[in-house]
């Protein structure tokens, strides 16, 4: 089973230096084919190249980065449609690269959250009730997780507390991408990604800078991987590649949909592991305003008591820009995604209107919504282990026949759900495979 430690992954300029000329070619019969040019795939390729192996990365999209994608066209400024935050844990690679390359980072924690009840700010007494609910909810998760209880977060929630619904909305849909009955306390407990920092130039921009000269074939979705004999054969829309091994870094959503056929089929235990770690969903709804700030400070978070599953919580003016970014998660995110981008924008705008009145409509310019639910190469935002299935994260990482390897945020242990975790998973698998190919 592939594992990775906590030591820093950047050695001198190894990871930030350009690739040698020989490594940029795309041979027909490389040592390894990497499926997917996201964080995990690029890290795996870089580890293999660093060990002197020949690699070809095949990517279904027309760009690299996977779920890290910075959109600069919609609003005339960087907006991360996917991965948004890197973290302060020692050894997190993207944080180190951002600092080494002079990117501008900004704190994104909820230290300065403002709560509205209808069209007014919460009272001190209401804030106290909310804080108590959030603290007790987190304590309940921690007790269960620390004890190794792989049970649903909903089953341990102190449901009778006032304001618990809002605390649950943050803990489940907004953070884990799942409603609490689908969240494992153990998976929550093992997840460790404090110190969130946004990237002003865009997280996707950072990932693209890292991988821009890698040997990647774009617009090349993989239809079949044959791994029954010596080596592997990878069939893509741009031809077939033969290699000694393959590393598959696509999401569990893509694997569950069987968008890639495997010959022979994946064993039952592997398919069960894929089912145990499904994709959750977080929808971002950026709204552009003409300078009105509604008395909200840059980076401030805005929330309110939810109505059932319906909630859209906001980050105000990230990087002091005129964007208000709404977030919807869990089942409601799937529902709003199915309704379409216009419905998501209308809902988010309507929630702000309830708090700030007609000033919202007067200052509104335009909006957008992320669509990872319908993206055929993602089919969700990031993974969340089902209750009772946390061990499936590591089962996902187990290779098959010393020829077929798997990597990604779903297999990143305590750094799951993050772009940093995907990198660490891909790097570990790349190093392991490079050693076995000697």
Image: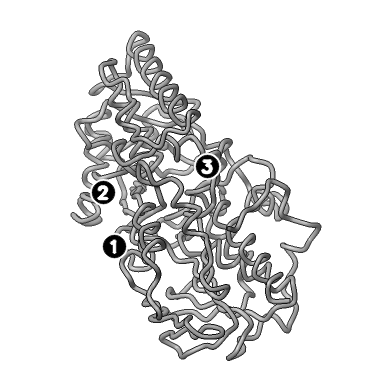
Tell me which residue sits at (43%, 45%) in the image: 390
Q: How packed is label 1: few (under 14 Cα within 10 Å), some, or many (20 or more)?
A: some
Residue 308 is situated, as x and y percent measured from the top left of the image, at: 19, 32
Task: Quarter of the image for the C terminus: give it.
Answer: bottom right
Tell whether 421 sits left or right of 437. Answer: left
Q: How packed is label 3: few (under 14 Cα within 10 Å), some, or many (20 or more)?
A: some
Residue 37 is situated, as x and y percent measured from the top left of the image, at: 52, 70
User: Between marks 3 and 1, how big is the CA–CA gap?
Assistant: 29 Å
Tell whether 369 sits left or right of 228. Answer: left
As drawn, the label of residue 345 is 2
Point out the tag, 1 or 2, that comes first from the N-terminus: 2
In the depicted structure, whether residue 404 falls above or below residue 92: below
Would you identify the image quadrant in which residue 121 lies? top left
Would you identify the image quadrant in which residue 216 lies? bottom right
Residue under numbered circle 1: 374
In contact (CB < 8 Å): disc 1 and disc 2? no
Would you identify the image quadrant in which residue 188 lies? top left
Residue under numbered circle 3: 319
User: Between marks 1 and 2, how big is the CA–CA gap?
Assistant: 17 Å
Residue 267 is situated, as x and y percent measured from the top left of the image, at: 40, 68
Q: How packed is label 2: few (under 14 Cα within 10 Å), some, or many (20 or more)?
A: many
Q: Helix or strand or loop: what does disc 3 sit on?
A: helix
Q: Nearer the viewer, residue 356 or 351?
A: 351
Point out the tag, 2 or 3, that comes first from the N-terminus: 3
User: Between marks 2 and 3, how big is the CA–CA gap?
Assistant: 21 Å
Tell me which residue sits at (55%, 62%) in the image: 40
Tell me which residue sits at (58%, 40%) in the image: 106
Residue 101 is situated, as x and y percent measured from the top left of the image, at: 70, 55
As drawn, the label of residue 402 is none
Point out the tag, 3 or 1, that comes first from the N-terminus: 3
């Amino acid at each position: 089973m592939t594992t990775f430690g906590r030591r820093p992954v950047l050695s001198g300029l190894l990871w930030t230096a350009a690739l040698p000329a020989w490594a940029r070619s795309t041979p027909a019969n490389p040592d390894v084919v990497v499926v997917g040019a996201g964080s995990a795939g690029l890290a795996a390729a870089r580890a293999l190249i660093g060990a002197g192996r020949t690699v070809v990365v095949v990517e279904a999209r027309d760009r690299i980065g996977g779920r890290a994608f910075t959109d600069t066209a919609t609003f005339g400024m960087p907006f991360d449609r996917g991965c948004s935050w890197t973290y302060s844990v020692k050894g997190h690679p993207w944080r180190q690269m951002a600092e080494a390359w002079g990117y501008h980072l900004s704190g994104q924690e909820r230290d300065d959250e403002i709560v509205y009840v209808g069209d007014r700010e919460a009272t001190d007494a209401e804030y106290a009730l909310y804080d108590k609910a959030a603290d007790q909810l987190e304590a309940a998760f921690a007790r269960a997780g620390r004890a190794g209880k792989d049970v649903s977060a909903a089953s341990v929630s102190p449901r009778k507390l006032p304001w618990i619904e809002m605390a649950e909305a943050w803990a489940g849909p907004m953070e884990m991408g799942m409603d609490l009955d689908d969240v494992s306390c153990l998976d929550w407990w093992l997840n460790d990604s404090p110190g969130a920092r946004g990237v002003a130039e865009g997280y996707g921009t950072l990932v693209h800078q890292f991988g821009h000269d890698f040997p990647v074939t774009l617009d090349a979705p993989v239809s079949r991987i044959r791994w029954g004999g010596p080596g592997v054969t990878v069939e893509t829309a741009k031809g077939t590649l033969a290699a000694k091994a393959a590393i598959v870094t696509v999401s569990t959503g893509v694997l569950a949909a069987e968008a890639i056929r495997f010959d022979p089929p994946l064993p039952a235990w592997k398919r069960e592991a894929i089912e145990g770690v499904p994709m959750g969903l977080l929808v971002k709804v950026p709204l552009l305003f003409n300078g009105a700030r509604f008395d909200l400070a840059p980076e401030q978070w805005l929330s309110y008591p939810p109505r059932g599953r319906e909630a859209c919580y906001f980050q105000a003016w990230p990087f002091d820009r005129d964007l208000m970014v709404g977030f919807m998660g869990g089942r409601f995110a799937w529902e709003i995604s199915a309704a379409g981008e216009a419905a998501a924008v209308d809902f988010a705008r309507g929630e702000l209107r309830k708090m700030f009145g007609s000033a919202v409509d007067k200052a509104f310019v335009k909006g957008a919504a992320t669509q990872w639910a319908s993206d055929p190469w993602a089919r969700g935002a990031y993974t969340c282990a089902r209750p009772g299935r946390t061990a499936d994260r590591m089962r996902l990482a187990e290779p098959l026949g010393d020829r077929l390897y798997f990597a990604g945020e779903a297999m990143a242990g305590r750094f799951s759900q993050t772009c940093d975790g995907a990198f660490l998973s891909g790097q570990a698998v790349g190093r392991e495979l490079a050693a076995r190919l000697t």
